[in-house]
Amino acid sequence: MLMMPVLDLQFGERIVTLMAALVLVLQIAMVSQRWIVLHIRIFAVQSLFLAMIAATIAWYNHAPHIYIAAVLTLIVKVILVPILFERLVTRMEIHEEIEPIVNVPLSVLIAGGLTLVGYVVAESFYRPDAPGVGHNALAVAISLFLIGFFTMINRRKALTQVLALLSLENGLFLAAISLTYGMPLIVELGIFFDVLVAAMVLGILVYRIRETFESMDVSRLRRLRG
Amino acid sequence: MIAELFLSGIVVWLAGAAASLALWRQPALARRVACGAALGGSLLDLAASSAALFSASPVFIGLPFGNPAFTWAVRLDPLSAFFSVTLAALAAAVSLYSFGYLKEMEGRRNLGAFGFFFNLLLLSVALVFTASNAFFFLVAWEVMALAAYCLVSFEYEKKKARDAGVLFLIMSHAGTGLLLIAFLVLASACGSLDFSSFHLLASRMTPLQQGTVFLLFLFGFGVKAGVVPLHIWIPEAHPVSPSNVSALMSGIVLKTGIYGMARVFFDFYGAPPLWMGTVVLALGVASALLGVLYALMEHDLKRLLAWHSIENIGIILIGFGAALMFRALGQANLAALALIAGLYHTFNHAMFKGLLFMGAGSVVEATHTRNMEKMGGLIRLMPVTALCFLVGAVAISGLPPLNGFVSEWLTYQALLAGFGTTQSLTRLMFPIAGSLLALTAALAAACFVKAFAIPFLALPRSPEAADAREASFTMRAGMTILAVGCVALGLGATWFVPVFDPITQQTLGVRASSALVMAHGWALSPGRPHGGTISLAGMALFFLVAGAAFALPLALRWRRRTVRGPAWDCGLPGLTADNEYTATAFSKPLRMIFSVLYRPRREIQAEYEVSPYYPSAIRFESEIEHPFEKRLYNPLRDRIMAAANRMKGIQAGSINLYLAYIFITLILLLLFGVRG
């Protein structure tokens, strides 16, 4: 009797939905965040929830290869990337806060609007009989993607743009595992490799931009225009 | 066996490209490796493609790359094999020539890079001719364009070379864009990219689609072939590139456009509507005539040859256009005759234009100028080059008994036969095209009188020309091979014509050679009653015998006595090179006759010191107008630049703004997708 909820698919779906909601809340928190270090940590926590979602899906659907994706998420996004970025922040002695282009209250409102768009879009993909974790997770995934994209637009510093890009990628990951219980493993591995390389390359790039322009502000890149 | 030969040719070219790049620090070695690999690859390709031309069924070779949707596969059917033979024969001679030609560049230029692009160009052209699907074709096509661009701009420190390269690249890309659309339309109609599934496909489409695809292909391939009005890159790109590259560009890279047209017009279309043939014929006539007219006004030896490339592409297209019209009229035999004429001329042009460009290269290397007015008297200093150039000049002028005559004669025969095949007004096209072709041939002969006489005869017009030295052994060998080829293709025409049987069988379902070849291979006729008949070998034999009969008694009777005396100098003592007939003067009558087209502008400024009868200096300037640049391309370029300037507003250079553009587009597309 005690084991029942642990095996019930319906129950699993609710857990996934709950965690997806938390992921979404964290995403909106990231939009409103002004401190870079805190921004990085929120990203780490968000990725942790994502890894848990992956593990939950793997458990309830008996798809062992998703465990690998979950473990990789844990290693790459929860541990490696945040450490890498925090070291970058320390090394470059960034203390100032993030200056978004659109102010915080308006950003949060826009993020809410984008969540709405996410639900509208996800509705059209929803088939009651299709396998998958229900349309909530997909809607959250699309919202994550859109809000991540918006955050990327809304940031001036290359480092915070990279963070936004990574949270956008989280949205893609969620969409992939909630729709299809994970893409073929080789694709997942490729994506993780991509994320790691992207983080490293962008880390270097951020460093270079600062060296060249004495600032991480990408709006200085405007000077490169021909 | 054919597959192994073909693949080893590819491998040799690839290895040559890689090795010469690796050896760029040792120019002498890089030169030998590059030219040796180019020669070896060409010979292997020659063996493979000539075997494939006569093999019973098309040879299909899959390369170990790609995936099921985009296969890397080649197919040597008769049409592909014929063009490959053309490539390989020319490339072998040019590679041999390059051994000597590139020696002068040693130490001054990066021969490793040159060898890389040279081998890459040969490889990509070979794959263009043999690619068996649209995807692979376009890949090879673009590699070819890039390799050709790097070779054209090889002397990159000269602004003209850079500009010519950029012009070529822009034109080439515009053409590829058209081809891409056309192939996609075909692919969406049959659901496959394979050329074999395109066979006769176009004729099953609606007339509107058919016409659109036809025009896209015509202009897309026309850019590469240099059809008027898409020709403007040719007179810029050919002169500035190294001469062995010019020989390849003119001899074979232009022919990729011709190959594309042949593939589309005769393989993808069954019986095309009459207007298509008419359009091709009209474009061919325009190219031929305008090409030769502008060639006449040119004093830059290589630019002159470049304009002649446009002329000869026009002659090829006259053959193709007539073949298309005959096909639309249901005259398969005449269509085969016209197609043979076009293809024969394609091969001939590769031979004699390669020869002429190599001859021009030897001359330019010896005199360090491309301006004919500064050459002169080279026949004594460079006898072998002069003789080879003369053979090429006679061939391109369409004089018997060389190869240019045969293909032009076949074209005339096809055009003359065309008048009686239909009652509609379109039949007037045939005699009009025929007479304009005759005019073209006559003007070409006039032009090559100039192109041979001014550089090679009389006295040297500059100290550089007086110091010229004969080309090295390999250069002479390369030229001699092609010169012998020109003679052989003329005298042996009746033995060469059966080569086209597999092609006409494949495309038109007719084997024409038995009707064309008469009298056990001694005579050629258009295969219809009241047509002309010609026996080149017989003619040559007659002149040989008659000449011998005439000369032998003279030689036997009189001992050779030469009396040298001064030339008549009109009473002005001391004739010098300044008194010679110049190229400008030679072409003056034609400049007057066609002044409506040329709109010549002449400016004479004289400076006087004492009296107006004794000018101390005279400055003379003369130029003609190029209507396509002035009236078509310049306004077009200005429009594009103006539009680009207006678009500059959205290019703020801010990453955030660019991201916002993408974001807004994405949201709109998502919402649009949900609604739909």
Image: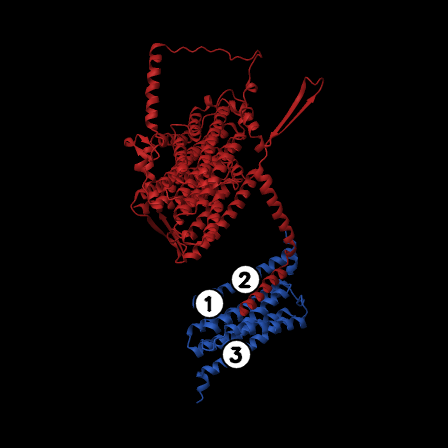
Q: What chain does badge 2 belong to?
A: A
Q: Amino acid at mark 1?
A: Glu
Q: Earlier in the sequence, mark 3 or mark 1?
A: 3
Q: How busy is the neighbourhood of tag 2: few (under 14 within 10 Å), some, or many (20 plus)? A: some
For label 3, the residue is: A17
Colour of chain B in the image: red
Which one is nearer the viewer's eye here, B538 or B245? B538
Q: Residue at x 57, y 75 (%)?
A: A24
> Is the same chain shared between marks 3 and 1?
yes
- State the SS at label 1: helix
Residue B252 is situated, as x and y percent measured from the top left of the image, at 43, 40
Indicate which label's residue lies in the foreground, 2 or 3: 3
Residue B535 - label = none
For label 1, the residue is: A188
Q: Earlier in the sequence, mark 2 or mark 3?
A: 3
Q: How busy is the neighbourhood of tag 3: few (under 14 within 10 Å), some, or many (20 plus)? A: many
Relative to residue B620, is residue B411 depicted above or below? below
Indicate which label's residue lies in the foreground, 3 or 1: 3
For label 2, the residue is: A200
